Image (cartoon, grey):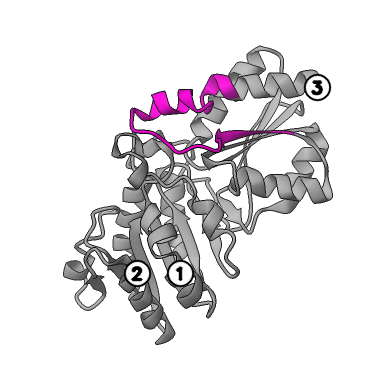
Amino acid sequence: MSLATRMEFGKTLIEIARTDESFVVINPDSKSQGLENFGTLYPGRGYNFGIAEQNMFAAAAGFASCGHKVFVTTFAVFASMRACEQVRTFICYPNLNVTIAVSHCGLQVGPDGVTHMATEDVSIMRSFPNMTVIQPSDAVSARAAAHAAVSFIGPLYVRLHRDPVPDIHDPVTYRFEIGKANSIKEYGDDVAILVSGILLTKALKAAEELDMMGIRCRVVEFHTIKPLDENAVIKLARATRAVITVEDHTVLGGFGAAVAEVLGEKCPTRMKRIGIRDVFGESGPPELLYNDHGMSVSDIVAAAVELQKAK
């Protein structure tokens, strides 16, 4: 088990800052990504705003309007909801160079409960013009995302996670290009499993089980939710005529909804969405929550079997 995506992202930013003085880091007195001491390591480049997220994002806009590259770190619920107006009007509207790196997303937050469990943030952020939304799936991709974020220009939302997950990607061969999906596993063209985020591990396990059942899947990672790699979505749909999306987020306006929008307009296809339905999350162990909300490996397998029967 490697570092959580949130901690690998923060660790990588600290490493990059040793030789790259182009950015500052702002945080609300939280330890969400291990960046709370950034200002001590690099004096004059780290600022703690306390528990005042709306002010923090307004200040980030001020820094950016003066030519700085700004990283803001906080919990996803606070960035997407408590400071929603500031993100929309002060950062996205003037198209400022602010990266919003957030943690504690989805049901993986588990015991922290609904108040700290962001399950609607992608729906909110991808609706803002000028906003780009990315989501790594393991520590390797989180590290690559940090490098991509430093060189990115414009509003950027980076969705990170609380707990460690197994590494999937090979750090030597992995490539992270914003806006481009990555094929992870190709068994065949019966079903395409499109995944964003840390449920990639479950999707790969489901594909293995389906292969043993004689159902051949493609597993493709979409680390960029906006702009979505529409060409990859359409190509997969045309090849398989059966698409499953998997995400640790509500299906209302999230990654699955983004895929459905593309397919509905450009390539109507049989589809199933694995994610949180029209309900709030709950407190509890993450794996139990995934089972209760129909987001387990067996749920992905069942969706693929149903789609295959309907073809």
Q: Which residues are magenta?
A: 271-299
| Neighbour tally class for label 1: few under 14, some 14-19, many 20 plus, Cα within 10 Å | some
Q: Earlier in the sequence, mark 3 or mark 2?
A: 2
| Neighbour tally class for label 3: few under 14, some 14-19, many 20 plus, Cα within 10 Å | few
Residue located at (57% from left, 65% from top): 128
Q: Is residue 306 left or right of residue 38?
A: right
Q: Earlier in the sequence, mark 2 or mark 1?
A: 2
Q: Is residue 261 left or right of residue 296?
A: right
Circle nearer the viewer, 3 or 2? 2
Compute the Cα span from label 3 to label 1. Answer: 44 Å
Circle nearer the viewer, 3 or 1? 1
Residue 89 in picture, x, y percent from top left: 49, 75
Task: Answer whether labels 3 and 1 touch (C-beta < 8 Å).
Answer: no
- Which residue extends farthest left? 40
Residue 47 visible in the displayed image: yes
Residue beneath disc 1 = 85
Task: Answer whether labels 2 and 1 touch (C-beta < 8 Å).
Answer: yes
Marking on residue 310: 3
Compute the Cα span from label 2 to label 1. Answer: 8 Å
Q: Secondary structure at mark 2?
A: helix
Quarter of the rendering occupied by the N terminus: top left
Is 288 one of the magenta-colored residues? yes
Residue located at (33% from left, 39% from top): 113
Quarter of the rendering occupied by the C terminus: top right
Residue located at (76% from left, 21% from top): 308
Marking on residue 198: none
Residue beneath disc 2 = 54
Residue located at (44% from left, 58% from top): 80
